Image: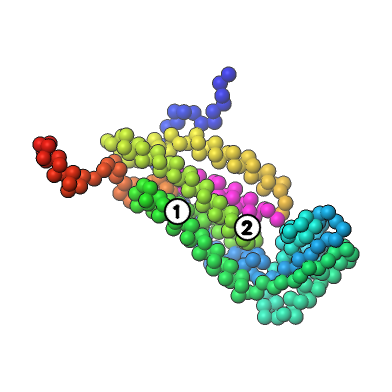
Amino acid sequence: MRLLKLVPDDTNINFLQWRMPFYVVSLLLIAASWVLVFTQGLNYGVDFAGGQEIRATFVGQEEADIPAIRSTVGELQNVGDPVVQRFGSPNEVSIRVKLPPEAEGNPAFADQMTRTITDALQAEYPSIRIDGVDSVSGKVSGEFREKAAYALLAAMLAIAMYIWVRFEWQFGVGALFALFHDVSLTLGMFALFQMEFSLQIIAAILAIIGYSLNDTIVIYDRIRENLKKYRKMPLPELLDLSVNETLARTVMTSLTLLIALIPLLLFGPASLFGLVAAITLGIFVGTYSSVYMAAPILIWLGVTSRSFVPQEGAADRQERIARGEG
């Protein structure tokens, strides 16, 4: 019995034939994404915008009913969409709510919102015990945003340096541009649809960077092998050959991830929607950027068939002359 193959072994798709139109479209999408980020802004969650955190224990219950708690708090006026998570034991929860702009610098407003939430919870769950209330100020949330941006930038630069050392500097630049493309489009999606942007999304973006990098390195590794093997092949043809040779692996990896992500995106809890949406988009743009961003840019950065030929040093040249090899 023959195994089903989604991608035949002898694919010969001319990917780089359309590299210029795809590059133009990608550059326009990157520009549009950053325009959206700077004009509409991101809908920051409690972690980045500031808010109130209430820690509570549901005494007498083995496990807190998180969907019911989220519904109870979410129905309150001027509270918005709360973030409810387990905190320690199964019957302990952390409830975080984002404060509206008028609450900035107004402790009385924040205290009133906290009392409203705790009164509603105590009315619904008489056995609840409030363990503590913390405020996340705008200053602290600003530091979170700054550190998150530094974390993403550091991850991208470290990846570029790693690829630079492992391959050539052109490959590092190509990988960095592909990662910038993926992160930009993800931020653009969150700015366009105004989905909540929280620490969860930072984790999702780091996962996208990891996936895109893995896909790019596989293609780059095959390009390097083929550069050593086919010295006279024109570079565009060699890049097409390398992408086609790794296509089966790329398709299978992406499909495996999407099989797990799409049901979670459609039927999963609302609290995970942003995280799953970001990773799902990242699978598409990461695969696309590895093929149409990271590979074609090598042509414009001057990679040639001699890029991986060892360069002869002065000592090697003298030894060759001494052997009478000219």
Amino acid identity at mark 2 = Gln
As helix, strand or loop, the secondary structure at mark 1 comes to helix
Are the residues flagged by discs 2 and 1 in contact, CB closer than 8 Å? no
Left or right: where 105 falls relative to 237: right
Is 322 within the magenta?
no
Check if residue 280 falls in the magenta segment: yes
Image point (24%, 45%), residue name = 311
Q: Residue at x 28, y 36 (%)?
A: 231
Q: Is residue 178 above or below residue 230?
A: below
The dot on residue 159 is 1
Residue at 73% across / 59% down in the picture? 88
Quarter of the image containing the N terminus? top right
Is 99 left or right of 33, judged from the image as shown? Answer: right
Q: Amino acid at mark 1?
A: Ile
Of residues 163 and 29, the one nearer the viewer is: 163
Q: Which residues are magenta?
A: 271-291
User: In the picture provided, is 236 more to the left or to the right than 109?
Assistant: left
Q: Earlier in the sequence, mark 2 or mark 1?
A: 1
